[in-house]
Amino acid sequence: MIFGAFERMVAFRYLRARRQEGFVSVIAIFSLLGIALGVATLIIVMSVMNGFRADLLGRILGLNGHLGVYAQAGPVADFDAEATKVSQVPGVTGVTPLIEGQVMATTEIGAAGALVRGIRPGDLRRRPLVSDHIVQGSLADFDDDGVAVGDRLARRLGLAVGGPITIISSQGTATAFGTMPRIKTYRVVALFDVGMYEYDNSFIFVPLEAAQLFFRLPNTVTSLEVFVADPDRVREDRRLIAAALGGHVRIVDWQQANSSLFNAVEIERNVMFLILTLIIVVAAFNIISSMIMMVKDKGRDIAILRTMGASRGAILRIFVLSGASIGVVGTVAGLLLEAIRQALQKVIGTDLFAAEIYFFTRIPARLDSGEVAAVVIMALVLSFLATLYPSWRAARLDPVEALRYE
């Protein structure tokens, strides 16, 4: 082993400070707590940010798909044949023909801008993000002139299930008296709440055939929405889909469509990692200060050990082990903080994070084993580096000078 039995015995004995050396022990305890809190905070915050990213990604991709296939110009003709070709590409799990258009939604109470999505009733019912979040009505009546409206948009317009909603398109019809806007009234059959303000406040789902009739796109759609098995491999899937369709299409993946949003999330995540790493760095400086004070207090002991035959390497290893032990125990405590919290709850019989106290009952968290390993390794390395200078000073201590002044 790197550390001998004698070195381990002396190192751990130095950590149990006597009464006159209690201040050094207090600094070591605070260093241990700092390492533990730093590691735990880093793991918790990074897991929560991963969870929010995954939750955000799930909501966005639950409505928008992973790729959008568009014609080079105009709508997509012969879309069923094109959808069949795309569905045969390895990795593709679903293809949905869509019609999208900006409209003005009006009721007797007011008006608001909205995005109409024409989709086949069966495709909408198979979309869990919408079908599992119906707050009023049912998708069973989603056909002909029955539409599904976002819950927030419905509240703005004073809509309820069974009520009428009028849609006005800016692409009007040319007449002898000028261009007349296209107007159509539909019946609201369902209200959905997917948990994202942008979607709940602006989306209106209309049956595909009704949308084709309203937007005057007979036998065509504006795009094909494609779902794949692995969203992180969309670039490779994009290349395969383009090859299957002969390359005469325009394909936009979710990373391109939401690049600004996810870039902001990634930047925030990296900044939080750097900021919270400072907690561990400060704890490492505390280890340095406690070790320097320990070396100063143990000057006479070091001199006696040297005169008894202990080598400089042995002295170095003793103090490295003393300081590194603080970092190792603190890192393990931070890693097991959740288990410690649960044990405390059982002992005191109280929920430390009761839902009645906080405004949420669950935070989306996603633990990444790679990130946890990186945090633990970083904490251990910083703790080890913090012991090198004090240990080196202890090893270079002249026993004659130490005994003379002691």
Image (spheres, rainbow, N blue to C red):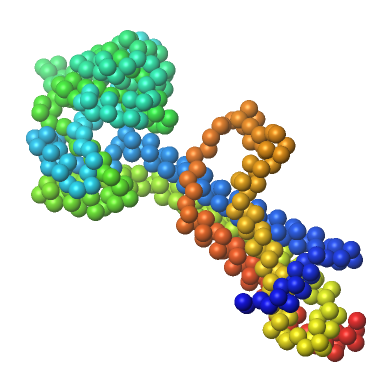
Q: Identify the residue shown where x is 18% and y is 20%.
A: 210
Q: Position of residue 49 (x, y in %)?
A: 50, 46
Q: Relative to 376, is 402 above or below?
A: below
Residue 22 lies in quadrant: bottom right
User: Disc count in the image?
Assistant: 0
Quadrant including the N terminus:
bottom right
Q: Nearer the viewer, residue 367 or 182?
A: 367
Q: Nearer the viewer, residue 341 or 364?
A: 341
205 horizontally vs 315: left or right: left
Quadrant including the C terminus:
bottom right
Asked if one can make out residue 366 in the rendered structure from this viewpoint, the answer is yes
252 horizontally vs 192: left or right: left
Q: Relative to 144, is 119 above or below?
A: below
Q: Identify the residue shown where x is 70% and y is 80%.
A: 316
Q: Identify the residue shown where x is 57% and y is 53%.
A: 42
Residue 118 lies in quadrant: top left
